[in-house]
């Protein structure tokens, strides 16, 4: 047979491509669920990392994950994972940004005041090993713990990643990695940009956001149990300062919310202090 | 198992005298990229070995049917299919390693060793010989990767396969005298080590001749 004729060449190429396509489609179908499970497990491990859970030697991280993370909220398409650790709610935000060579990402766990960082976890696609890649290591991540993402006025200003010796203005800071300036700046920018994306969650929640932020649609759910607690910690605190004016209207909603839940006395109390 | 002289040469030649990396200087790009630590280097070596051997076998099987005008394309399709296969399998069964190797698994397609062996050997040789040639070249490549990664991880991070070799107490940070060589982490250092290996290799082989 003439293997150099046009017809043969075209038929040959077609057959080869079809065989390869079918084979790969098949493999992708068979392995797909397993890969999905891996991706999901990886994400759960990272969230556990942000929640400061040590999963080395943990046989079943997924079980640990589901025992801690109770709920997932959606804020304009960005997920908020609600975890409960030692009876305290923690809110885990998802981060996505750019490093030096490729994408970086991570999870930031906030305490219930939506200000104090409980824990942070970072990942990267292809940062330089030993330099930028160190963002995934504990010494870098632990710096974030206990830092505040808000300034004294309560505005969300993020946490800066700066080289030791420089002083951030109006926000808290952690030390950058030496030799990895661009990755460090990437982390800093990522935090800032992503916290801005979560503004609807952070800001509304911030002042009686407990009501507004979560009230829409699922008021009762969130008012079970810790209603009074939140109103005291959240609203009362801020109404002592001057930041009160702009937020007052939230109280109406707080009151509205209150109707749907029992025991809205503390909310009333919050309003009283507001009027004062 | 007694191997014939020719078989031995096909299989073992690429490990030393005709090494794809240090003699033919092929596949340097990935040798720089994945040798910061031993583990990814090992996985990369195994992956390339499997892919070269398999694609050599497939192309050798097809060698009399492949239209000459599109032979490079057919070779590329076969290699690409195998690489995708390996990448999918890694993602399903060794997710961490797959993430570590990231794009470099996909870039095996562009590894010159593959196209080089297919074009120079598999197109004109029998299936079994092609398989041995692929195996030998893959292992020759893996060997260099492992040597480079050994030095880079040992001196760059003080660990081997993730286990600490240089004690923590030696480090300056803990009051010792030792510090990791940051240069080892940079791709340039891999090139310098490969250069060193080529130098040593030439010097030794010269004596033999």
Image (cartoon, rainbow, N blue to C red):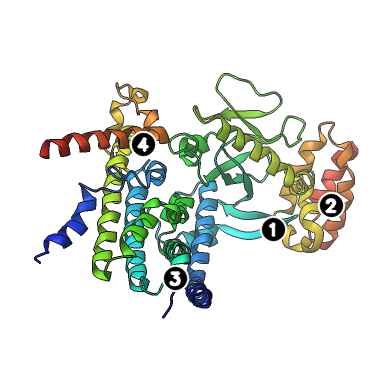
C-alpha gap between disc 2 and disc 3: 76 Å
Looking at this view, name the residue that lies furthest to the left.
B2
Question: x%, y% of residue A261?
Answer: 79, 61
Q: Is residue B10 above or below residue A91?
A: below
- Mark 3 — residue? B67
Question: x%, y% of residue B172?
Answer: 34, 22
- Mark 2 — residue? A254
Secondary structure found at label 4:
helix
Residue in the image at 63% along x and 55% along y: A81
Inspect this view and state whether residue B85 appears. Answer: no
Residue situated in front as seen by the camera: A85 or B141: B141
C-alpha gap between disc 1 and disc 4: 46 Å
Residue in the image at 81% along x and 31% along y: A241
As drawn, the label of residue A7 is none
- Work out whether mark 1 precedes mark 2 in sequence or the reverse, and give the earlier one: 1
Residue in the image at 68% along x and 28% along y: A171
Q: Chain of mark 2?
A: A
Q: Is residue A17 left or right of residue B6?
A: right
Residue situated in front as seen by the camera: A215 or A100: A100
């Amino acid at each position: 047979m003439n293997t150099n004729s046009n017809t043969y060449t075209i038929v040959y190429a077609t057959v080869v491509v079809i065989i390869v396509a079918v084979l790969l489609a098949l493999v992708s179908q068979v392995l797909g669920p397993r890969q999905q499970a891996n991706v999901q497990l990886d994400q759960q491990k990272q969230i556990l990392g942000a929640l400061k859970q040590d999963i080395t030697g943990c046989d079943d991280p997924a079980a640990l994950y589901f025992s801690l993370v109770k709920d997932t909220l959606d804020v304009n398409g960005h997920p908020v994972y609600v975890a409960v650790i030692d009876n305290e709610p923690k809110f885990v935000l998802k981060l996505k940004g750019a490093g030096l060579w490729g994408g970086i990402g991570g999870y930031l766990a906030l305490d219930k005041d939506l200000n104090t960082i409980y824990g942070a976890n970072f990942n990267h696609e292809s940062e330089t090993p030993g330099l930028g890649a160190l963002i995934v290591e504990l010494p870098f991540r632990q710096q974030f713990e206990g830092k505040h993402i808000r300034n004294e006025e309560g505005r969300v200003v993020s946490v800066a990643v700066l080289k030791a010796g420089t002083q951030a203005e109006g926000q808290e800071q952690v030390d950058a990695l030496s030799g990895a300036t661009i990755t460090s700046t990437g982390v800093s920018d990522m935090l800032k940009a992503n916290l801005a994306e979560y503004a609807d969650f952070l800001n509304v929640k911030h002042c009686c956001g407990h009501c507004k932020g979560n009230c829409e649609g699922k008021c009762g759910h969130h008012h079970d149990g810790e209603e009074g607690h939140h109103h005291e910690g959240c609203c009362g605190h801020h109404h002592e300062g001057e930041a009160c004016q702009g937020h007052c209207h939230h109280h109406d909603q707080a009151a509205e919310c209150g109707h749907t839940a029992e025991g809205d006395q503390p909310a009333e109390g919050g309003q009283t202090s507001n009027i004062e | 198992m007694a191997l014939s002289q020719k078989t031995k040469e096909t299989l073992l030649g690429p490990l030393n005298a005709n090494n794809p990396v240090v003699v033919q200087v092929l596949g340097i790009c990935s040798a720089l990229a994945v040798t910061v630590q031993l583990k990814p280097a090992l996985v990369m070596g195994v992956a390339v070995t499997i892919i070269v051997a398999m694609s050599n076998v497939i192309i050798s099987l097809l060698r009399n049917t492949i239209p000459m005008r599109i032979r490079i394309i057919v070779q590329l399709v076969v290699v690409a299919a195998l690489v995708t296969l390996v990448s999918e399998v890694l993602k399903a069964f060794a997710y961490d390693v797959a993430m570590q190797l990231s794009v470099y698994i996909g870039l095996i397609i562009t590894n010159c060793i593959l196209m080089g062996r297919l074009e120079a050997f598999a197109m004109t040789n029998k299936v079994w010989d092609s398989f041995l040639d692929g195996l030998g070249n893959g292992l020759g490549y893996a060997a260099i990767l492992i040597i480079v990664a050994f030095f880079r991880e040992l001196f760059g991070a003080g660990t081997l396969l993730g286990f600490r070799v240089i004690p923590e107490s030696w480090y300056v940070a803990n009051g010792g005298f030792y510090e990791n060589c940051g240069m080892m982490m940079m791709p340039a250092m891999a090139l310098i080590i490969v250069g060193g290996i080529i130098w040593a290799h030439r010097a030794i082989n010269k004596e033999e001749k």
